[in-house]
Image (spheres, rainbow, N blue to C red):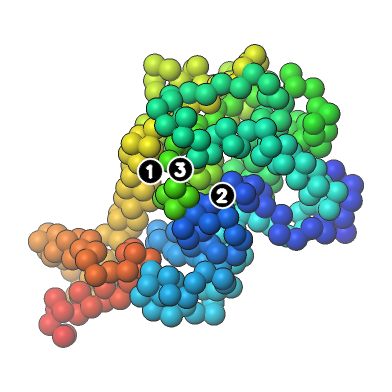
Amino acid sequence: MKKCALCLEKEATETNTHYLTDSIIRRTLNEGGSKERGKTLSFGVSNTSPFTEMSFKENTSPEKLQEALGRETTEEENEASIAQRDYSVDEVFCSACEKRFGKIESAFTDKFLKKLRMNPSLENASEVEFEKDIKIFRLFWLMQVWRSAVCTETVKLSSDISEKLRSLILLGIEVDENELKQFPLSITLLYTGTDPETHTENLVGYTSDTNPILILMGEFVIQFFENNESVRYFDFHGLNDEMTYTQFINYQETAFKVRVLSDIKRKAFLISVIDQDLVLPKFEFYMKTFIAFWVEVTGSPPPGHTVGEYTKELTDFNNVPVGQVLSEERVIDFTIKFIAKKIGLI
Ligand SMILES: [Zn+2]
C-alpha cells in the first residue's frame, strides 16, 4: 500500500489531485480565460525539451486546436497532454488530505482572491498589504510550494524543510501562525486587467533554480526561500527591484506585503521570460542540430552564410500556426527540406 504523502498514514487513493490550485491556474490554461475544467490550451514550459510542445485537454474546441496546430490532433497527443499539463497527480494523497487542501483553498478564495484577481482598484498599485488572516494566506502559498516539491522533479526542498512544511500543512488552520512566518516568502501579483481572456497570456510553470524556488501560477508568482540566511537579491526578468526587493520578502511579518506589477510591467516580464528562457535555449539547440545534420549529409560544416540563411528562414513565422512555431515536427521537417534544397536534392 502506498501511503499518503501528507498524513503518512492512510492509503494514497485520490486521483486527479492538483498540486497547483486548479482555480488559480485554470484561467491561464483555458482558452478565453474561462473557468471551466477540461478546456486547456497551453504551451509547454519544460526545461528538458528544447521544442515548444502544445498540450490540450480533450474538450478544447477542435476548431481552435486545429487552427493552432495547423492539422488534426493525434491520439497520442490527446493522451500525453491530459497526463502532463494539468499539474495534477494520481495516488499521492488520501481523500482526507485532499479535503485538508480544499479547506485551505476555499478559505484563501473567500478571504483573498477577490481582493487580488481582476480587482480594478489595483490597476495603478505597486503593492497591497494584508494584516488579517496571514495564516491562511501563507498556508495557501506554502502548500503550493510543498505539493510541487512532492509531485514534480523540478522543485526541490531540503528534506528537513519539506518535513517541517508537511507537518504545518497537516495541521491546517489549527497551525501556529508564527511557525509559518519563519519561511521568507514573496508573492507578486501580475496585474492582468479585468478581461478574463487576457489571463491566457500568463504562464504556469517552474524555474529550475532551487534558491529561491520560483513558481509561476498565472497572475501570481511565488518566491520561496528555505530560511532567512538564504535570502538574496534575485533578478528574474524584472520581477524584483533591487532597491525594494527586501520589502517584499515577508519574514516574521506583522502585515504581508504583496508586490503588484502593472499590466505594462507584466507584459514586459512575460516577453522577457518567453524570449530568454524559452526561445533562446531552444535556438542554441536548433543550431547545433542543424550543423550536426549538415555535417552528416555533406561531410563538412555548413558555410557561415548558410547558417545565417537557415536561422532567418526558420524564424520567419509568417503563415506558421502559433502552436507549430518551434515545434519538433516543424523544426525537423524544415531542417530536412532546407538541407535537401541547399545540396540540390530538390
Ligand atoms: Zn492523507
Compared across the picture, whether 142 is left or right of 124 comes to right
**Mark pair 2, 3: CA separation:** 16 Å
Q: Is residue 29 above or below residue 101?
A: below
Q: Amino acid at mark 1?
A: Leu
Q: Nearer the viewer, residue 296 or 146?
A: 146
**Quarter of the rendering occupied by the C terminus:** bottom left
Q: Which residue position holds label 1? A: 270
**Mark pair 1, 3: CA separation:** 18 Å
Q: Which residue position holds label 3? A: 194
Say whether disc 1 or disc 3 marks the residue closer to the N-terminus. Answer: 3
Comparing marks 1 and 2, which lies closer to the viewer?
A: 2
Q: Residue furthest front?
A: 120
Q: Residue at x 71, y 59 (%)?
A: 16
Q: Residue at x 56, y 67 (%)?
A: 57
Q: Based on the displayed image, in which of its 4 quarters is residue 72 positioned?
A: bottom left
Query: Residue 81 at x, y = what percent?
Result: 55, 67
Q: Is residue 346 above or below residue 127?
A: below
What crowding class fits label 3: few (fewer than 14 Cα within 10 Å), some (14-19), or many (20 or more)?
A: few
Query: Residue 273 at x, y = what percent?
Result: 38, 43
Q: Secondary structure at mark 2?
A: helix
Q: Nearer the viewer, residue 250 or 99?
A: 99
Q: Amino acid at mark 2?
A: Ile
From this viewpoint, is residue 211 visible? no
Say whether disc 1 or disc 2 marks the residue closer to the N-terminus. Answer: 2
Q: Residue at x 39, y 20 (%)?
A: 242
* Image disc number at residue 25: 2
**Quarter of the rendering occupied by the N terminus:** bottom right
Q: Nearer the viewer, residue 135 or 232?
A: 135
